[in-house]
Image: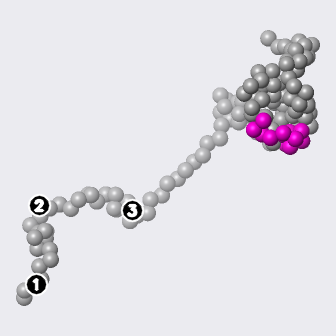
Amino acid sequence: MAISDEDRKKSQSTRTAKMTKKQKVFIKAYSEACACNVSATCKAVGISRRLFYHWMADSEAFKDAIEDARESLIDLAETKLQQNIMEGKEASIFFYLKTQAKHRGYIETVEQKVQINPFEALMQELPDEPDMSDSSSINSQDYGKEDSN
């Protein structure tokens, strides 16, 4: 069920009554001038990011207003994407199909061909330990003895 613009405005006015003047200034700048960029908005209104996150943790009204602003920006981006599709802009069409039409086969796959060096392949075929049952193998007690011949 969609919320009407009138209901949204009533909700926003009730919510903003619970915010400080500085928080209201922040919300206005965040949603209108700074495109929901926290760093840019903090700089524009003269507060620290730490204070922003403190407000997010302590004020449900502030947090809700931030979320509404983010959702509004997403709505705008979706509208622009739809406009681009209608105008035949291929990048937008490809993006939409890759993200929304996977069930129809519009999916990007990556092919990887792994080639092993022939020496590495040979090394992988050899046993890890030598076969010590062969009589021609050197005994461990023969190590370190000098040839007396």
Whether the residues at callouts 2 and 3 have beta carbons within 8 Å, the answer is: no
Quadrant of res 24: top right
- Which is more foreground, mark 1 or mark 3? 1
Front-most of residues 44 and 146: 44
Q: Which mark is residue 85?
A: none
**Where in the figure is residue 135, as x and y percent of width and height?**
9, 67
For residue 16, say whether it is visible: yes
Amino acid marked by disc 2: Ser
Which of the two residues, 34 or 16, is positioned nearer the viewer here? Answer: 16
Q: Is residue 29 magenta?
A: no
Residue at the spot of label 2 = 133
Q: Horizontally, is 82 left or right of 138 in the view?
A: right
Q: Which residues are magenta?
A: 40-51
Instruction: From the image, tell me which residue sits under label 1.
Output: 147
Describe residue 100's horizontal placement relative to residue 36 as left or right.
left
Q: Which residue is at a point 71% across and 36% down the rendered structure image?
A: 98
Query: Mark 1 is on which residue type?
Result: Asp
134 above or below 60?
below
**Rendered location of residue 69, percent (x, y):** 84, 28
Colouring convention used in this rendered image of the protein? one colour
Looking at the image, tell me whether mark 1 or mark 2 is earlier in sequence order.
2
Q: Secondary structure at mark 1?
A: loop
